[in-house]
Image (cartoon, grey):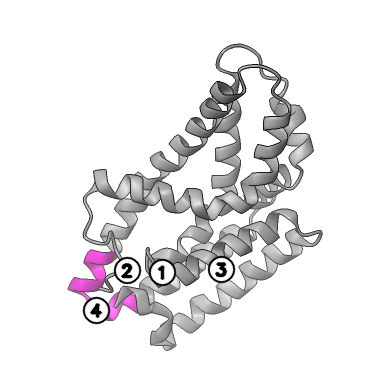
Amino acid sequence: MSAMGGTMSLGLFVFIPVWTLMMAAMMLPSVAPVAVLYERSIARNRIARLTAFSAAYLLVWALASVPAFAIAALVSSLAVDYPLTARFIAAGVFLVIGLYQLSPLKDRCLQHCRSPLSLLLHYSSFQGPMRDLRAGTRHALYCLGCCWALMLVLVVAGIMNLLVMVVLAAVILVEKYWSRGEAFSRALGAAALVLAVAAIWVPGLSQGLS
């Protein structure tokens, strides 16, 4: 198993903050427009409210690290114990990515994230002391719904593959804010399905598992 793959030999309680920091860095470019608008909409207690929004957002990604850890650990174990399965694991990962990219749920989450202003109007309707926590949680769930399948690429390419992280961040940004982002998302889905077939025959596509 590659040093960048699996759980990087980290225990769960170390993996969680590492994963959360990685996701925060990757999501920052696409979250920034909403965060800026949200910040401008706050008239009082700005620091406290932004802290609550950010904490809730990061908490969702921290919780997502638990299944990510389980998947990475399982894949790592299978790849080490049964090296010949690596290409089939990679094929399965690409298949899941492709199918989800083409799914109605992906489209629904992406539609929410493509309009920062409409999101702001929606979040501004939240009332009470928990409103910023609700807004941060809701936005993180939309982001997670848009991106969780794409993050599976890290299982194949290596959890700490910086090049893949940069590419994924760019892909997420394009999906959300390019005028043809939905078509781009579907094209990615189709490409992932092609890679699912190719991974069985091209060992290089499962490099992060070997």
Quarter containing the C terminus? bottom left
Residue that numbered label 4 is attached to: 83
Spatial CA span between label 1 and label 2: 6 Å
Q: Callout 2 environment at 10 Å: few (<14), some (14 to 19), or many (20+)?
A: some
**Mark 3 or mark 4, which is nearer the start of the sequence?**
4
Residue that numbered label 2 is attached to: 4
Spatial CA span between label 4 and label 1: 20 Å
* Residue 84 is a magenta residue: yes
Q: Which residue is depicted at the point 62% across and 45% down?
A: 31
Asked if the residues shown at circle 1 and circle 2 are in contact, with their CB atoms under 8 angstroms apart, the answer is yes
Could you tell me the amino acid type at mark 1?
A: Asn
Q: Callout 4 environment at 10 Å: few (<14), some (14 to 19), or many (20+)?
A: some
Callout 1 secondary element: loop
Residue 186, placed above or below residue 67:
below
Q: Which residue is depicted at the point 57% across and 31% down?
A: 136
**Mark 3 or mark 1, which is nearer the start of the sequence?**
1
The front one of 4 and 98 is 4
Question: Residue 108: x, y in percent?
Answer: 69, 46
